[in-house]
Amino acid sequence: MKRFISLSLLGLGLAACFLFLSWDSPQKTTTDTYKPNPLEGTWKLLASGWNADTKKFADKAIFKIYTRDRYATVIFDASTGEFAGAGGGTYTVKGNQFTEQLEYFSFDPAAAGTQQTFSFNILDGDMLHQSGKLNTEKYPDYDIQEFYQRVEPGMSDSKKHHPLVGVWNIEEATYGDNRPDIKEKYGKVIKIITPEYFYGAFFNPETQYFNGVTFGTWVAEGEQYTETILTYSWDNSIVREPQSFTWKVENDRFYQTGFIDSDKYKNYRIEEVSSRME
């Protein structure tokens, strides 16, 4: 018998009929002609059913971000911030189904490169029901039922947002005393900045390598950009400790410079130069 863990959902009246939204992913042209799809935004899990793993993740915080072209998921302990898993890539929508093209999946790295299709419904504009089956080498025919609450809208209309909001591809970086070749060392480093949250992932979709994820909230005042990390896969001691940087955006390039300080990374220099993807 399947079990569902509900954090607050059962009292929301699921007997109400789900609103069906028919949507086909449009051709990407310009910001002025692009129409957001109903999945875009940041979502927080309220209830779920995952085969035998339902209880395993009952106390975890789970966030999912859909931008215009990309999606990203992060799972961590709600009380300690300890990292538990992540996945992400690109996606397309057709009718009431969406297909995710996995570029990384920490629970089953061999799933990178696969496509996973699910059904979805939106209720009252701020409740997402995702259902279907995950099919990977480690998780064949794996039933998924998830209910999310929207915590912020999509970010397609960048004219209404801070210039930092968007999807960024980190092309150059200094980490500590090293200046690695990003493509050679990691493959890709993608940073998503929504109006409230930031999400960074280090991965290589070609080799199915996954290095890690950072996720949290941010604020910017003048030239200072401050991240408050909610989970950091490399060192949990940094969780909830604000880390400040200087920033600027010029010609769709994002420059971030500063230091982080944790048990593992003492006075650790970070310099990143990113190009805008969305």
Image (cartoon, grey):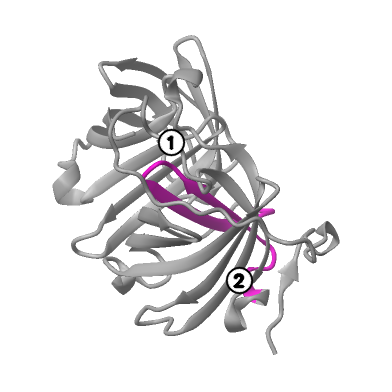
Classed neighbour count for the residue bearing mark 1: other residues with Cα under 10 Å, few (<14), some (14–19), many (≥20): some
Tell me if residue 34 comes above or below residue 113 in the rendering. Answer: above
> Is label 1 in a helix, a strand or a loop?
loop
Tell me if residue 72 comes above or below residue 105 in the rendering. Answer: above
Q: Quadrant of the C terminus?
A: top left
Classed neighbour count for the residue bearing mark 2: other residues with Cα under 10 Å, few (<14), some (14–19), many (≥20): some
User: 37 and 268: which one is in front?
Assistant: 37
Query: Mark 1: which amino acid?
Result: Lys
Q: Which residues are magenta?
A: 56-80
Residue at image point 78% right, 61% down: 16
Asked whether residue 264 is drawn in magenta, I would say no
Residue 15 falls left or right of residue 237: right
Residue wearing tag 2: 145
Residue 14: quadrant of the picture: bottom right
The disc, 2 or 1, on the residue closer to the chain's N-terminal end is 1
Residue 51: quadrant of the picture: bottom right
Asked whether residue 73 is drawn in magenta, I would say yes
Secondary structure mostly taken by the magenta-highlighted segment of the chain: strand
Tell me if residue 60 comes above or below residue 72 in the rendering. Answer: below
Q: Quadrant of the N terminus?
A: bottom right
Q: Position of residue 134 (x, y in %)?
A: 45, 75
> Is label 2 in a helix, a strand or a loop?
strand
The circle drawn on residue 35 is: 1
Extreme residue toward the bottom, this view: 1
Is residue 184 among what the camera can see?
A: yes
